[in-house]
Image (tube, rainbow, N blue to C red):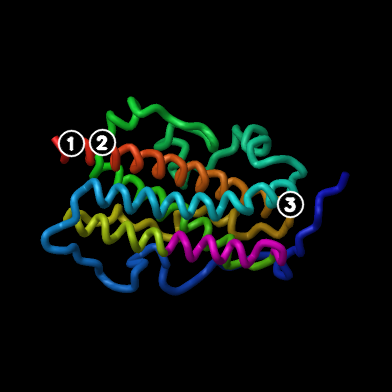
Amino acid sequence: MSLPVTDDLTRSTRVGPEGPEFWIQPCGFTVTGSNPPEPDAVLAENYALQLGVDLSYVNNWKENFCQDKFRMSFDAKVAEDAPFRYDWLQVSTTIPKKPSETLSATYYSQKEFSAMLTESSNIFQRIAVGWEQVDYERTDASYRDLFTSTKNRMKNTLCQLDYYLAEKQMSPAPNPTRAIMPTELRTITSASQRDERNFRILKEYVNAVEYYADGFNYFKTSLSSRSSL
């Protein structure tokens, strides 16, 4: 059975986006914390809620995407694609799970709240670099609006994360630039190869959102318990 065709790019090469990078100052201004600052348990609850909304949104279309492009479920495609990871996203070296897997509370109990905030800032900014290219190309008529909506959700979540970091008087992780994404991933002309690249960025995004949603749900509970003692 042949796979559906996505329109090829009309140019042999595709220059990536230019101008402001949306993951740098995603709120549009420098964020400052409140006085007194919000308790960590509240920050964890708000962040977990935000990530849960993001996860629900992408879950609503990821299966259709995989069925349309690869004729298999998202989880089946994750298993098939397991050998292929983009090191520049740093998900594979930071998050010790695959999409749809869960980690124990014991694992998260060994993590530190502030460090995980900064870590998530690094990971989501890197994913944003890749997703900006996916959205920029706008070659997939069936999914381009969903790609744009997902990018806007990433920007909103990064903005909220800047607030949480400001509450802790912490800075975001060092801002990655567009240069972290290899040029060959920006100059793809084959529709099927673009679909593979888009999936590989998507699977890392799903995995990261799952991981940090679970992590900050754990912190919400554990920090609330400590504050009530």
Q: Is residue 215 above or below residue 198?
A: above
What secondary structure is the stretch in magenta mostly built from?
helix
Amino acid type assigned to the residue bearing label 1 in the image: Arg
Q: Which residue is mark 2?
A: 222
Q: Residue furthest right?
A: 1
Q: Position of residue 148 (x, y in %)?
A: 56, 66
Q: Which residue is mark 1?
A: 226
Q: Is residue 151 above or below residue 227?
A: below
Please identify, in this view, whether the residue under mark 1 or under mark 3 is nearer the observer.
1
Q: Residue furthest front?
A: 228
Q: Which residue is mark 3?
A: 192
Looking at the image, do the residues carrying marks 2 and 1 touch, with CB atoms under 8 Å apart? yes
Q: Position of residue 55 (x, y in %)?
A: 50, 50
The stretch drawn in magenta includes residue 146: yes
Mark 1 and mark 3: Cα distance apart in space: 51 Å
Mark 3 and mark 2: Cα distance apart in space: 45 Å
Q: Position of residue 3 (x, y in %)?
A: 81, 49
Amino acid type assigned to the residue bearing label 2 in the image: Ser
Q: Between residues 225 and 114, which one lies in front from this camera angle?
A: 225
Amino acid type assigned to the residue bearing label 3 in the image: Ser
Q: Which residues are magenta?
A: 140-155
